[in-house]
Image (cartoon, rainbow, N blue to C red):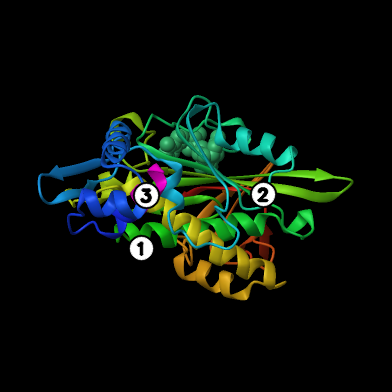
Amino acid sequence: MEERILDILRRHMDSFLSGEQLSRSLSISQAALAGYIHKLRQQGYDIQAQPHLGYQLTGLPERLLEPEISWRLQTKVIGQKIFVYDSVDSTNSVAFILAEQGTACGTAVFAEAQSKGRGRLGRSWFSPKSQGLYCSVILRPEIPATKASLLTLMAAVSCAQTIRKIVGLPALIKWPNDIVINERKVCGILTEIQVKDSKLKFVILGIGINVDTQRSKLPSGASSLRGEAGATRLPFLRLRLARELLRQLDQDYLYFQDNENPQNLIVRWRNLSALSGKRVKVSKAQEIIEGQAQDIDEQGALVVRLDNGFKEHVLAAEVVKVR
Ligand code: BT5
């Protein structure tokens, strides 16, 4: 019932709705309606009540709530099922367990806080409560495991696009898994895969975005969206980011699935790349190579032109320096 009340109030956020009308259309008494309104307020919804005028929704909770994320989301695959937790060790770990249990492709897991948020290679991801967006999505693509890194690339495009659309800042992709604004990292992506009998069983796409995170608490070279946006008023930022991220991922994943050679994604990636043409130092397993970042190939590898003119395609590595 709360959901139905919210649905009506959300569609009339610019006007009051009479309690009588509302209770009649829901076939409940006005006293019962007042009870539900009280419960919604306790969840953090601002609902004004005026004698003779009725009710009006004037504010949404700052907490992430599943009904708020999924309300009229209209995605085809991503976010069809959404779990929101208060605190977890890592949304990637939760999504991994759900995927092992057979949970559907597109399921998204969010948490207000992570006690063991992780990055790549055993690194940690600082995930303070309600200051960031911590999200993991289960994917079950029918592709060879060797192509899984293309999904990191896809997610990077979706994240950069989402941030640009919601915050209006020039987010760029720093290969392979960082999103930067003004050269500061505001978002990281962690792609984990499960392979069985040399077949890709599922992929967990983990995305962490610093939204309100205090700069002084972040590692050097990192920042948050609020930090980069300055004084701009951005209400319900995490909620709007969460919804747009799921929509963007949905579009991009559908395209990815339908196209064996996702050229359009690669073109969008190139246009968003922070590295194109820059001199980079890339740390591979045992060595460091230096050269000019030129492109990415159809597998998602960074193409570096070495000083001797040879081109090297690096797949699993890290850019340690950009000039
Ligand atoms: C990443 O790893 O950038 C991937 C981060 C993915 C986090 C998401 S949150 C939801 C999901 N659940 C998880 O448990 N993880 C995913 P990497 O490129 O290895 O970068 C990690 C490094 O970034 C650390 O060693 C720090 O130097 C730095 N770092 C840690 N926390 C940060 C933060 N909040 N913002 C920016 N940089 C951070």
The answer to whether the beta carbon of the residue marked 3 is less than 8 Å from any atom of ligand 1 is no
What label sits on residue 146 in the rendered view?
A: none
Q: Magenta residues? A: 1-7
Residue depth check, mark 1 versus mark 3: number of the one nearer the observer:
3
- The residue lying at 52 percent from left, 31 percent from top is 117
Tell me how far mark 3 sits from mark 2, CA to CA. 59 Å
Which disc number belongs to residue 316?
Answer: 2
Drawn side of residue 294 relative to residue 165, left or right: right
Q: For residue 165, which numbered disc appears in the image?
A: 1
Return the residue found at the far right: 197
Locate residue 35, reporting x and y percent: 30, 34
Q: Quadrant of residue 162?
A: bottom left
Q: What is the x, y in percent for residue 74?
A: 49, 63
Q: Secondary structure at mark 1?
A: helix
Q: Nearer the viewer, mark 3 or mark 2?
A: 3
Nearer to us in this view, 244 or 298: 244
4 or 316, which is in the foreground? 4
Q: Is residue 210 above or below residue 76?
A: above
**Residue 187 to residue 161: above or below:** above
